[in-house]
């Protein structure tokens, strides 16, 4: 009996000790969660992402040279592909000849205007002389010195001269309508021809395809001798110096995430020895299933709720990225520190679109060439008006 009581006492002590351990463990975890864990959200469903800049041709042509290959780094403006420029050279020469012809035609219209004014002045002088002659003849016709037929001929001549003056004035008005308020460089025909010169020069320029930004070449498919059409993908350039992280967090983890909160990241490719430091930049427009090729259909009787994941964009430190480069698609582990609550919540903000610099297609050399063609065909008498 005493032995049984002793065993019960030991069992009770063990249960009490176990209960105490469980309570202390719960208190310790609660304290850890309250002071530390609740300020962090982490996920290992994170991957490196970057822009994939497709290199395409804007004109048709035959590839004569390829200056870049997969894995090669290229700088902004570096020549990647060359197309046969023969057709473009012919088109540019034809456009320049059309511009020269248009300038000469407009120059002729200006000269015709001056000639018509001179002809009208000449006809008006002749008309004045004919009227004076008629007045003299009519004065002496009563005395019989001039016959009535001569007087009638003088009147007919005046009528012919008046009709000629009216016709030439109409011709002058029609000619002036073609050049009114314009000069040779600003005439519509010259401007249209100049636009065709620019178009041809632009087509010639586009036979040399350059890198729009610095990056690494990937997915090169173009080969020398290929005949390509506009829009044909030739290769891709990936700017690895400007990658970001897409960390897929559960929807229940997004409530306290804010723009600008610090993030610690680790890449599997470097193991645990390299830490990256980034910032929360924005929240995706929807979960992965929303943009799937076959979205889930939940309007059924056997529906089961599945926690969705939404991509959170994380910007990386450029200095760390330069020291330890990453590649697109590599796995990452992201841990967000939510102590900083100064930024707006990610689920209430729409990330502003990035502005990219577009190189101007207009070339000053083309304008200089057009101005030279106009000046060379405008004539010395009109050069001062250019």
Image (cartoon, grey):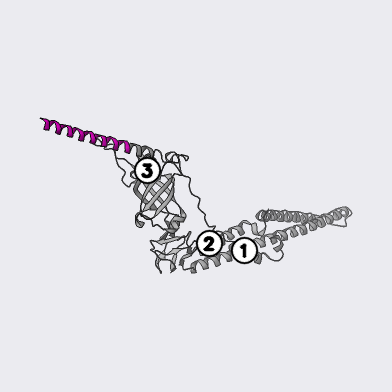
- Secondary structure of the residue carrying tag 1 is helix
User: Is 22 included in the stretch rendered in magenta?
Assistant: yes
Residue 230: give its label: none
Q: CA distance from mark 2 to mark 1?
A: 14 Å
Q: Give the camera-side residue of 63 and 360.
A: 360
**Quarter of the rendering occupied by the N terminus:** top left
Q: Nearer the viewer, mark 3 or mark 2?
A: 3
Q: Position of residue 29 (x, y in %)?
A: 32, 38
Q: Give the camera-side residue of 274 and 306.
A: 274
- Secondary structure of the residue carrying tag 3 is strand
Q: Which residues are magenta?
A: 1-28
Residue labelled with disc 3? 41
Residue labelled with disc 1? 368
Sequence-first tag of 2 and 1: 2
Q: Residues within 10 Å of mark 2 (few under 14, many from 20)?
A: some
Sequence-first tag of 1 and 3: 3
**Quarter of the rendering occupied by the C terminus:** bottom right
Q: CA distance from mark 1 to mark 3?
A: 61 Å
Count the marks: 3
Residue labelled with disc 2? 202
Task: Decide: is 78 above or below 164.
Answer: below
- Secondary structure of the residue carrying tag 2 is helix
Q: Position of residue 131 (x, y in %)?
A: 82, 54
User: Is 329 included in the stretch rendered in magenta?
Assistant: no
Q: Nearer the viewer, mark 1 or mark 3?
A: 3
Q: Give the camera-side residue of 129 and 5.
A: 5
Q: Answer whether labels 1 and 3 touch (C-beta < 8 Å).
A: no
């Amino acid at each position: 009996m005493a032995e049984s009581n002793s065993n019960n006492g030991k069992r009770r002590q063990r249960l009490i000790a176990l209960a105490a351990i469980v309570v202390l463990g719960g208190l310790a975890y609660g304290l850890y969660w309250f002071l530390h864990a609740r300020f962090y959200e982490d996920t290992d469903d994170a991957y490196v992402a970057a822009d994939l800049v497709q290199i395409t041709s804007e004109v048709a042509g035959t590839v004569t040279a390829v200056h870049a290959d997969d894995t090669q780094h290229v700088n902004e403006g570096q020549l990647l592909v060359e197309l046969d420029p023969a057709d473009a050279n012919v088109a540019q020469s034809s456009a320049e000849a059309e511009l020269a012809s248009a300038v000469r035609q407009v120059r002729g219209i200006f000269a015709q205007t001056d000639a018509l004014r001179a002809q009208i002045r000449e006809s008006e002088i002749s008309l004045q002389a004919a009227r004076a002659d008629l007045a003299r003849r009519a004065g002496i016709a009563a005395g019989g010195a001039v016959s009535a037929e001569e007087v009638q001929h003088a009147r007919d001549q005046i009528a012919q001269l008046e009709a000629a003056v009216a016709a030439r004035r109409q011709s002058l008005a029609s000619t002036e309508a073609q050049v009114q308020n314009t000069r040779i460089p600003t005439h519509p025909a010259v401007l249209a021809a100049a636009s065709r010169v620019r178009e041809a020069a632009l087509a010639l320029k586009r036979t040399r395809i350059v890198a729009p930004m610095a990056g690494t070449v990937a997915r090169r498919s173009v080969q020398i001798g290929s005949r390509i059409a506009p829009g044909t993908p030739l290769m891709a350039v990936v700017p690895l110096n400007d990658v970001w992280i897409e960390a897929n967090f559960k929807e229940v983890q997004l409530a306290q995430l804010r723009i600008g909160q610090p993030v610690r990241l680790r890449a599997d490719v470097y193991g645990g020895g390299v830490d990256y430091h980034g910032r929360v930049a924005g929240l995706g427009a929807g979960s992965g299933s929303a943009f799937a090729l076959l979205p889930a259909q939940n309007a059924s009787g056997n529906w089961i709720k599945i926690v969705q994941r939404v991509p959170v964009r994380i910007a990386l430190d450029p200095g760390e990225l330069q020291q330890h480069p990453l590649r697109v698609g590599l796995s990452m582990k992201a841990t967000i520190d939510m102590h900083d609550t100064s930024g707006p919540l990610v689920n209430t903000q729409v990330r502003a679109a990035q502005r990219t610099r577009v190189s101007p297609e207009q070339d000053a050399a083309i304008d200089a060439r057009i101005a030279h063609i106009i000046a060379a065909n405008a004539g010395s008498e009109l050069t001062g008006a250019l």
